[in-house]
Every structure is written in structure tokens, then in C-alpha cells.
Image (cartoon, grey):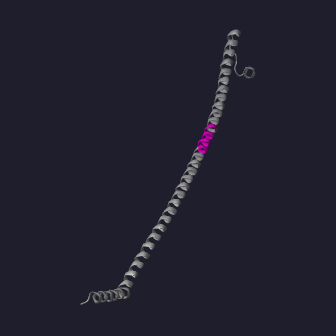
Amino acid sequence: MNINATLIIQMIVFLILVGFTMKYVWPPIATALDERAKKIADGLAAADKAKADLASANKRVEEELAKSRNEAATRLAEAERRAQSLIDEAKGRAVEEGNKIIAAAKVDAEQQVIKAREALREQVAGLAVKGAEQILKREVNASVHADLLGRLKAEL
């Protein structure tokens, strides 16, 4: 055979092979490549969306943490105010109770002073009667001089 004829036949076989490949082999490969490219693009889009969702979630978490910290600080301040008011209330009650105790003690002391004065008056009256008895060298009748002793008590 001739080299030119071989070359022409090889070109025809090559063109048939190219045509066959273009018609039957290439479309499935192109479809597979397109599907693969689409999957990759979808994966990248999903990754971007997930990244955005993560950033959004992190932002919400930070906001919630800040809100919780503020709420905790508010509750702590409220508890401190409440504790201070309870302390002030207890101090007020203690002062009132102390004043009541002091007033009761003063009343008791005044009553004891009055009782002591009465006892002292009785003793002075008795001593005065004894002194008068000794001065007069006679016995004093208590029933006769009761009015005199009552006035003496009142004067003392």
C-alpha cells in the first residue's frame, strides 16, 4: 500500500473516531463535568451560607451573653438595695425597741424612786415620832396624831 492512501485512511478513521467520540462519549463526560461543577458551586454556596449563619449565631450568642450579664448586674444591684433596705428596717426596729426599753426603764426607775421616797418618808416619820417621843418623855398616841404625821409626810 501506498503511504498516501494509508495516511488518508488513517485520517478518515481518525475523523470517524472523533465523530463517534463527539456524539457518544463526549456528552456524558461533559454532563458529568457540568454536574460536578454544579455540585462544587452548590457546596461553596452552602459553605458561605453556613459561614454567614455561624457569624449570625455568634452575634446572637454575644448579644444574649451581654443581655444576661446586664440582667445579672441588675438583679445583683436590686438584691443589694433590698438587703440595704432590710438592714435599715432592722436598724429602725432596733432603735424603736431600744427606745421602748429605755422608756420602760425610765418609768421603772421613776417608780422605784417614788417607792424609795415613800419608804424614806415612812422612815423619817417614824424617826420623827420616836424623836418627839423621846423629847416629850412620854408616849405619843398614834391614833391622835395621825393627822400630824400625814402632814409631816406630805411636807417631806
Please tell me in which quadrant of the rendered image residue 135 appears. Answer: top right
Give coordinates of residue 67: x percent, y percent: 56, 56
Q: Say above or below: 59 vs 96.
A: below
As for residue 91 lying within the magenta part, the answer is yes
40 to the left or right of 10: right
Q: Say above or below: 67 vs 77.
A: below
Q: For the view shown, which residue lies furthest in the left direction?
A: 1
In front: 88, or 43? 43
19 to the left or right of 82: left
Q: Say above or below: 152 vs 60.
A: above
In front: 92, or 44? 44
As for residue 119 lying within the magenta part, the answer is no
Q: How many marks?
A: 0
In the rendered image, which quarter contains the N terminus?
A: bottom left
In front: 100, or 91? 91
48 to the left or right of 144: left
Q: Residue at x 38, y 88 (%)?
A: 23
Please tell me in which quadrant of the rendered image residue 120 appears. Answer: top right
In the rendered image, which quarter contains the C terminus?
A: top right
Q: Residue at x 54, y 58 (%)?
A: 63
Q: Residue at x 47, y 64 (%)?
A: 51
Q: Which residues are magenta?
A: 84-95
In front: 90, or 148? 90
Give coordinates of residue 90: x percent, y percent: 59, 41
Magenta segment main secondary structure? helix
Please tell me in which quadrant of the rendered image residue 34 appears. Answer: bottom left
